[in-house]
Image: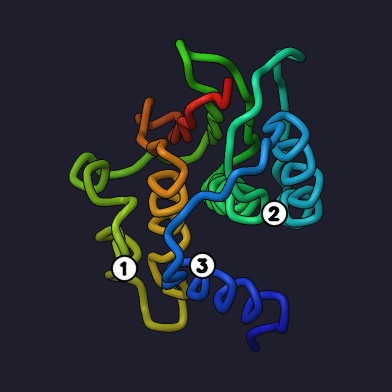
């Protein structure tokens, strides 16, 4: 049975994905606080899955310019995806990389197939393992990570995989600092 929270999250994803405005807005957003809130919100899911979640950041980071709700949704999607795939641990961090602020969300799961790296942020992307699962085990629509990509692009940023192997995956959300 699908719960109301799950349906609301799907609806939010769909509405954000088809938002015709396509502009990032002009609010200054402090990512360390936003990421910390997303991590704290994910703790019940992590506890339910038997996964620990850790967050580390440097204290002085420039803000980014954007829509807080969209950025929060992107971070939440990355954290939720990491929790679903982690064996025991998810590590979230924010840092400065050149003129950008980056958010890394690392899990210690089984990694992803090499052929998925180039398409994992596309709509309806599904791994061959998930596609081969019985219908009742699929429950993923391939929209969460695609939404992360769309939100990143709306904010002048990007999302990519910076690490993948048998010890897990680390996607990176990169956003330009609003200096």
Q: Which quadrant holds the N terminus?
A: bottom right
Q: Nearer the viewer, residue 159 or 26?
A: 26
Front disc: 3 or 2: 3
Q: Earlier in the sequence, mark 1 or mark 2?
A: 2
Q: Are marks 1 and 3 in contact (CB under 8 Å)?
A: no
Task: From the image, state whether disc 1 or disc 2 is nearer to you.
Answer: 1
Q: Position of residue 32 (x, y in %)?
A: 72, 29
Report the number of numbered marks: 3
Direction from residue 176 to residue 11 in the image, left or right: right
Position in image of residue 52 (x %, y %): 73, 37
Measure how far apart labels 1 and 3 are at the Cα level: 16 Å
Going by the picture, which residue comes out furthest to the bottom?
1
Calculate the distance from the C-alpha at mark 3 to the C-alpha at mark 2: 27 Å
In this rendering, would 137 be left or right of 125?
Answer: right
Q: Which of 16/169 is in front?
A: 16
Residue bearing mark 1: 124
Residue name at image x 54 percent, y 36 percent: 107
Task: Quadrant for residue 64, please give it.
Answer: top right
Q: Which residue is mark 3?
A: 16
Local secondary structure at mark 2: helix
* x, y percent for residue 5: 71, 76
The quadrant of the rendering that contains the C terminus is: top right
Q: Which residue is mark 2?
A: 49
Q: Marks 1 and 2, Cα distance to the nearest angstrom? A: 24 Å
| Local secondary structure at mark 1 | loop
Q: Residue at x 58, y 44 (%)?
A: 66
Closer to the chain start, of discs 3 and 2, is 3
Dot 1 or dot 3, earlier in sequence: 3
* Cβ atoms under marks 3 and 2 closer than 8 Å: no
Foreground: disc 1 or disc 3: 3
């Amino acid at each position: 049975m699908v719960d109301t929270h799950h349906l609301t999250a799907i609806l939010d994803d769909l509405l954000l994905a088809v938002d015709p405005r396509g502009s990032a807005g002009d609010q200054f957003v402090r990512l360390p606080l936003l990421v910390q809130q997303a991590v704290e919100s994910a703790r019940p899911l992590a506890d339910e899955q038997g996964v620990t979640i850790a967050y580390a950041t440097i204290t002085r980071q420039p803000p980014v310019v954007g829509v807080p709700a969209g950025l929060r949704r992107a971070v939440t999607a990355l954290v939720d995806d990491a929790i679903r795939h982690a064996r025991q641990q998810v590590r979230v961090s924010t840092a400065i990389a050149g003129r950008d602020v980056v958010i890394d969300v690392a899990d210690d799961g089984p990694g992803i197939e090499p052929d998925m790296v180039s398409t994992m942020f596309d709509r309806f992307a599904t791994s061959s393992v998930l596609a081969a699962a019985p219908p009742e085990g699929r429950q993923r629509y391939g929209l969460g990570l695609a939404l992360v990509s769309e939100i990143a692009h709306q904010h002048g940023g990007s999302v990519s995989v910076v690490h993948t192997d048998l010890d897990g995956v680390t996607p990176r959300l990169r956003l330009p600092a609003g200096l």
